[in-house]
Image: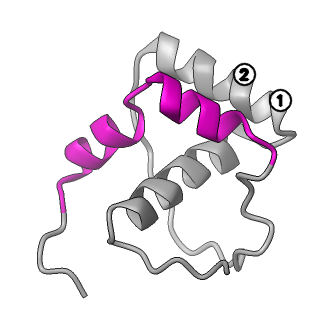
Amino acid sequence: MCDYIPSMQTVAYNAFNVNNKFLKYVATPLATMANEPMSKEDSITIRTRSEIKEILQKLANEGYRTLSQQCEMVLIEWLKENGYLKDTQK
């Protein structure tokens, strides 16, 4: 387990840091959570700029996901890439 857990503000800033790599990754059809367990226990409410919401909504629509699923996918992938969450897909 990692000793450092970033603040939610840090996670949100990094997860929604919109750059070409991020948009290219999220827009690919392979970036799905189809193999992830879907047990939902908690909810998170965030506030963001309209621009960020519009981008996420567009990506969600392109991937046939809800906005909530898109946001969760972004967070999960950021956590995996930064070593906070074990990558279960092989």
From the viewer's side, name the closer residue of 90 and 60: 90
Q: Is 23 within the magenta? A: yes
From the viewer's side, name the closer residue of 31 and 51: 31
Residue located at (33% from left, 62% from top): 82
Residue located at (70% from left, 75% from top): 36
Identify whether 90 is placed above or below 61: below
Q: Residue furthest right?
A: 64
Identify whether 65 is placed above or below 18: below
Q: Is 18 within the magenta? A: yes
Amino acid at circle 1: Glu
Cα distance between the residues tagged 2 and 1: 6 Å
Dividing the picture into quarters, in which one does residue 25 lie?
top right
Residue 26: image x %, image y %?
A: 64, 39
Mark 1 secondary-structure assignment = helix
Q: Residue furthest bottom?
A: 1
Quadrant containing the C terminus in the rendered view: bottom right
Quadrant containing the N terminus in the rendered view: bottom left
Residue 62: image x %, image y %?
A: 83, 29
Residue located at (51% from left, 34% from top): 22
What is the magenta range?
A: 6-29
Tell me the crowding category of disc 2: few under 14, some 14 to 19, or many 20 or more residues within 10 angstroms, Cα based: some
Circle count: 2
Marks 1 and 2: in contact by CB < 8 Å?
yes
Here the colouring is one colour
Amino acid at circle 2: Lys
Residue located at (18% from left, 67% from top): 5
Magenta: main secondary structure: helix
Q: Residue furthest left?
A: 3
From the viewer's side, name the closer residue of 56 and 80: 80
- Residue underneath mark 2: 58
Tell me the crowding category of disc 1: few under 14, some 14 to 19, or many 20 or more residues within 10 angstroms, Cα based: few
- Residue underneath mark 1: 62
